[in-house]
């Protein structure tokens, strides 16, 4: 019979091996969107020393690889009915190391939190700002000649999205030009004079 190991850590090991734990921002030492290669952050980031979060991430990946190999050894050693106490002890030690590495990672990178609109994977699910589906979509502000087009961006308080542009300043209505000069939604309103 195969040993029953602590639940949850196999998921942690698989996540670390698949690099779901993410990469780290070299300026704030916080989790950044998805898995970003340091080279994608520009030459300064690529050539800078690794952050504590990056070091902890790499250490957790190595611990997960060791743990996975140890579990494989346990399965092989125990499968034919032989005693496999040494392999179980080794797997137990590597499991403890993996748990410690996971704690180190959370200390270095921060713990998952509620997703806010800020370009960061706050809840560590490998998706960035997924709770804001209109982020990046087209938008407009104003009417008439004040109409401007932009894209949806994160609001200053990170709780939602806003249009990246503001309407232009309204002018004085000029009769007969076919435009909504005063940006009130009406063109060449009757009774207005220049």
Image (cartoon, helix red, strand yellow):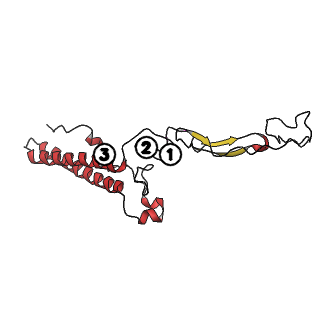
Mark 3, secondary structure of its residue: helix
Question: What residue is drawn where x is 22% and y is 52%?
Answer: 66
Which of the two labelled residues, at mark 1 and mark 3, occupies the earlier sequence position?
Answer: 3
Which of the two labelled residues, at mark 2 and mark 3, occupies the earlier sequence position?
Answer: 3
Q: Are marks 2 and 3 in contact (CB under 8 Å)?
A: no
Q: Position of residue 175 (x, y in %)?
A: 91, 40
Residue 48 within the magenta-colored segment of the rendering? no
Q: Is residue 19 visible?
A: no
- Left or right of residue 110: residue 133: right
Q: Is residue 192 visible?
A: yes
Q: Position of residue 183 (x, y in %)?
A: 79, 39
Mark 1, secondary structure of its residue: loop
Residue designated by label 3: 14
Question: What residue is drawn where x is 12% and y is 46%?
Answer: 89
Residue 37 falls in image quadrant: bottom left
Which dot marks residue 122? 2
The residue lying furthest to the left in this view is 83
Residue 115 within the magenta-colored segment of the rendering? yes
Residue designated by label 1: 118
Stretch of the chain drawn in magenta = 114-133
Q: Are marks 1 and 3 in contact (CB under 8 Å)?
A: no
Mark 2, secondary structure of its residue: loop
Give how far apart the Cα atoms at labels 1 and 2 are.
9 Å
Give how far apart the Cα atoms at labels 1 and 3 are.
27 Å
- Left or right of residue 34: residue 144: right
- Left or right of residue 104: residue 155: right
Q: Position of residue 29 (x, y in %)?
A: 40, 54
């Amino acid at each position: 019979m195969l040993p029953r190991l602590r639940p949850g850590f196999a998921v942690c090991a698989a996540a670390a091996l698949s690099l779901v734990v993410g990469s780290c921002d070299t300026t704030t030492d916080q989790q950044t969107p998805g898995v970003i290669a340091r080279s994608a952050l520009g030459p300064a980031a690529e050539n800078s020393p690794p952050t504590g979060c990056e070091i902890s991430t790499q250490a957790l990946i190595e611990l997960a690889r060791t743990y996975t190999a140890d579990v494989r050894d346990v399965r092989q050693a125990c499968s034919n009915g032989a005693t496999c106490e040494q392999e179980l002890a080794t797997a137990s030690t590597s499991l403890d190391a993996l748990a410690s590495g996971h704690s180190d990672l959370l200390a270095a990178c921060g713990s998952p939190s509620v997703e806010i609109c800020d370009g960061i994977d706050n809840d560590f699910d490998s998706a960035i700002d997924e709770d804001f589906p209109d982020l990046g979509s087209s938008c407009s502000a104003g009417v008439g000649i004040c109409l401007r087009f932009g894209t949806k961006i994160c609001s200053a308080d990170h709780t939602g999205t806003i249009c990246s542009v503001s309407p232009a300043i309204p002018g004085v209505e000029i009769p007969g030009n076919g435009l909504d000069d005063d940006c009130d939604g009406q063109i060449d309103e009757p009774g207005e004079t220049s």
